[in-house]
Image: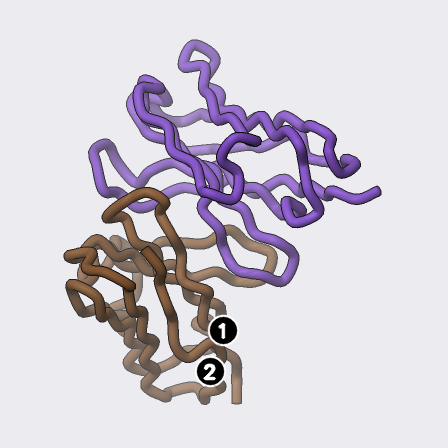
Chain colours: A purple, B brown
Amino acid sequence: EVQLVESGGGLVKPGGSLRLSCAASGFSFSSYSMNWVRQAPGKGLEWVSSISSSSSYIYYADSVQGRFTISRDNAKNSLYLQMNSLRAEDTAVYYCARDKSRGNYLPIGYWGQGTLVTVSS
Amino acid sequence: IQLTQSPSFLSASVGDRVTITCRASQGISSYLAWYQQKPGKAPELLIYPSSSLQSGVPSRFSGSGSGTDFTLTISSLQPEDFATYYCQQLNTYPRTFGQGTKVEIK
């Protein structure tokens, strides 16, 4: 069974930093592209970042480019999101998500339960 | 690529036929997915590519379209279908979502 478990969320002041982690199990982690998607309270889904299976390709939303860094450790079956220079508008539930299968142009097939990041003074 | 869903909110009764549209600001071939999200839960994939029902999704759901105009149809709305629906384009990065369509009980 595919499992994605996020951790690292919490309350942080504007301008601060936070590192999210996602522990993956139940599949060959090193074979799949991974994603972070966020959802502000009461709002819609926003794609944040994607990373290919070998970390060769990395993409970011314009809203986080230059502030967030996605990475992965295939030996530890883990995905990370380093978030710097946080702003109030980064407040959201952050989901770790796996592509449905291996390949290109694929949607998200599996989601974690999400971790809440609150940016407030 | 911008995705515009309509309507943003829909009030319907059990048994109604419901149609949600998603318009892309430029052509995305059939690289469009539909997700369903219930309160407090992660989204679930319903349809991808634009007209292919995912395994386990009830046949009352269907999708159509290519290029810039897409639709999600629920042929006979069931109580468990009251949720928010999102489209997402997979053609290029950033992989934008539509703003969502909330389907509520009339």
**In terms of image quadrants, where is residue A12?**
top right
Q: Secondary structure at mark 2?
A: strand
**Is residue A100 placed above or below B73 in the rendered structure?**
above
Residue A80, percent across and down? 53, 24
**Is residue A1 placed above or below B98 in the rendered structure?**
above
Residue A4, percent across and down? 49, 33
User: Which residue is more in the foreground, B79 or A79?
Assistant: A79
Residue underneath mark 1: B102
**Is residue A41 placed above or below A93 in the rendered structure?**
below
Q: Secondary structure at mark 1?
A: strand
**In terms of image quadrants, where is residue B50?**
bottom left
Residue B31, percent across and down? 21, 53
At label 1, the amino acid type is: Lys
In the picture, measured across the screen, residue B30 lies left or right of residue A27, that is left
In the picture, measured across the screen, residue A109 lies left or right of residue A16, that is left
Query: Are labels 1 and 2 on one chain?
Result: yes
In the picture, measured across the screen, residue B102 lies left or right of residue A55, that is right
**Is residue A50 placed above or below A62 in the rendered structure?**
above
Residue underneath mark 2: B10
Q: Are marks 1 and 2 in contact (CB under 8 Å)?
A: yes
Q: Residue at x 28, y 70 (%)?
A: B61
Q: Residue at x 15, y 57 (%)?
A: B29
Q: Which part of the image, by quadrant, shows the N terminus of chain A?
A: top left
What is the chain letter for disc 2? B
Specify whether residue B94 is in view.
yes
**In terms of image quadrants, where is residue A16?**
top right
Counting residues from the start of the chain, the first of labels 1 and 2 encountered is 2
At label 2, the amino acid type is: Leu
User: Which residue is more in the foreground, B64 or A40?
Assistant: A40
- In this view, the residue farthest toward the right is A121
